Image: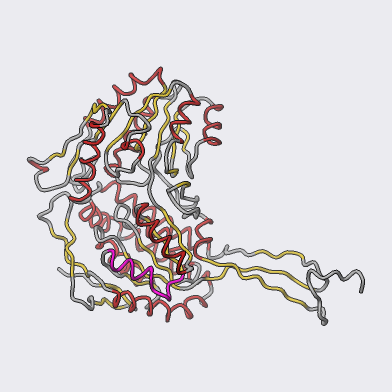
Amino acid sequence: MRFYNYIAGEWTPPQSDRWFANINPADTRDIIGEFPRSSAHDVDHAVTAAQEAFRTWSRIPAPQRGEIIRRAGDIFRRRKEELAAIMTREMGKPLFETRGDIQEAIDTAYYSATETRRLFGYTTPSELPNKMNLSFRMPIGVCAVITAWNFPIAVPSWKIFPALAAGNTVVWKPSEDAPHSAIIFAEILEEAGVPAGVFNVVHGDAEAGAALVEHPLVRVVAFTGSTATGTAIAARCGTLNKKVSLEMGGKNAVIIMDDADLELALEGVLWGAFGTTGQRCTATSRLILHAPIHDRFLEMLIKRARMLRIGSGLDPATQMGPIINQRQCDKILSYIQIGQEEGARLVCGGHRLASGEFANGYFIEPTIFTEVRPTMRIWREEIFGPVLSVAKAESFEHAITLANDSDYGLSSSIYTRSVEYAFAAIRDIEAGITYINAPTIGAEAHMPFGGVKNTGNGHREGGWTVFDIFTEWKTVYVDFSGRLQRAQIDTQLE
């Protein structure tokens, strides 16, 4: 079956008649469909449609735009089970996770809808008499949205709904590993009443993404993906003087102190490290254990990790699904080999599962390394798979040092019963997000999301802060004095 781009309210085949296959990573014999390998011509068609729609959409009162977005949330809720199965089939994570992915989009839709009544500006006193100073948030124009495959509905919703709520129009290039979910997203927005051209989907690979970034009518680029790609986009947007928001890699650490509830911490580490098969930017990839509980907790963790049920995400019993594709599978296995060559101790997993029920999919065991040093690549580089590196901390201060010894700074966590440790960690850990007695994953739609260092470029998605990405400020001065007044001129001598 072939699926098309969604441009100007129409389902449109690619101009070049080139296609790519969408494959179930749990069973590569299952071909979901063929999708357009779009060219710069297709991108131009979509961006032009978005530009033409911008003038009308931006002038619709914001609360009316919010009502359309709220209806989209209602439709996502109605189609939740159907969409969860589609998402699991094309990108692999278990149904209980894809349901959560959709719920996040529902929450974001409702939150963005309410924010259309709170796009507040500022009114301030003037330095001159009979004059008023005001400021307003204004829509920017056509927004390019480029997203990864691991959250094919939630992460795009963080960008698309606020962009639309603010009065912008959108051209979205979803990942080629999860294109079917984008088809449903477009169907839902169309049913909700988003006018033709306001929201567009262009499928494809890096060629389409580059054309979207380069297009002169695109004013904002919102990207989620690898640090290497995001850095290249930022460099190009700098040259083109375009606003850009980047959500990139992570190497997130959990600290477990000797006073922690170890059973609670165990559940959090298992979920943080192996939820979504470790394929999250917020996944727990580093574990820092306080020396007094190191051996005991490690024994508990290995035992439970070996018990995780691996398989197709469509099986209700599955706790951990497949790797997304062969390329990523090979990358993860290469890092496991690197860890062993560097001298880390492999204590759990480390192998691809390739026989029996796993024969036609991309499955890797939950993998744990101990005796990992901060100089090792498995400690420093994002693996994006079910690989956990464990280090021992001699003190709280040592644990903080280990946590901060990273080029990334997205999410972080500490398990402790100590108020002193908890608040010191909040202050001292270099990350955009810190959890106390909870894993590194689990964002909420009404709170800022983003990181420091190589994780991003300073913007925060989610919550009220996302509107800083998708609006620009206009300052207005209203002088009703009836005479020329000159600001910053000394008038005391007049």
414 relative position to 325: left or right: right
Establish if 149 lies above or below 422: below
- Quadrant position of the C terminus in the picture: bottom right
- Quadrant position of the N terminus in the picture: bottom left
In-front residue for pair 359/385? 385
User: Per the image, is 135 magenta?
Assistant: no
Residue lying furthest right: 493
Question: Chief secondary structure of the magenta span?
Answer: helix
In-front residue for pair 135/410? 410
Q: Position of residue 489 (x, y in %)?
A: 82, 70
Q: Residue at the spot x=12%, y=56% of the render?
A: 30
Q: Position of residue 321 (x, y in %)?
A: 22, 44
Q: Position of residue 426 (x, y in %)?
A: 53, 36
The number of numbered discs placed on residues in the rendered structure image is 0
407 relative position to 87: left or right: right
User: Per the image, is 213 magenta?
Assistant: yes
Q: Position of residue 456 (x, y in %)?
A: 44, 52
Quarter-of-image position of residue 284: top left
Colouring style: secondary structure
Residue lying furthest top: 292
Quarter-of-image position of residue 37: bottom left
Q: Give the magenta-colored segment's residue range.
A: 206-219
Q: Residue at the spot x=31%, y=36% of the render?
A: 378
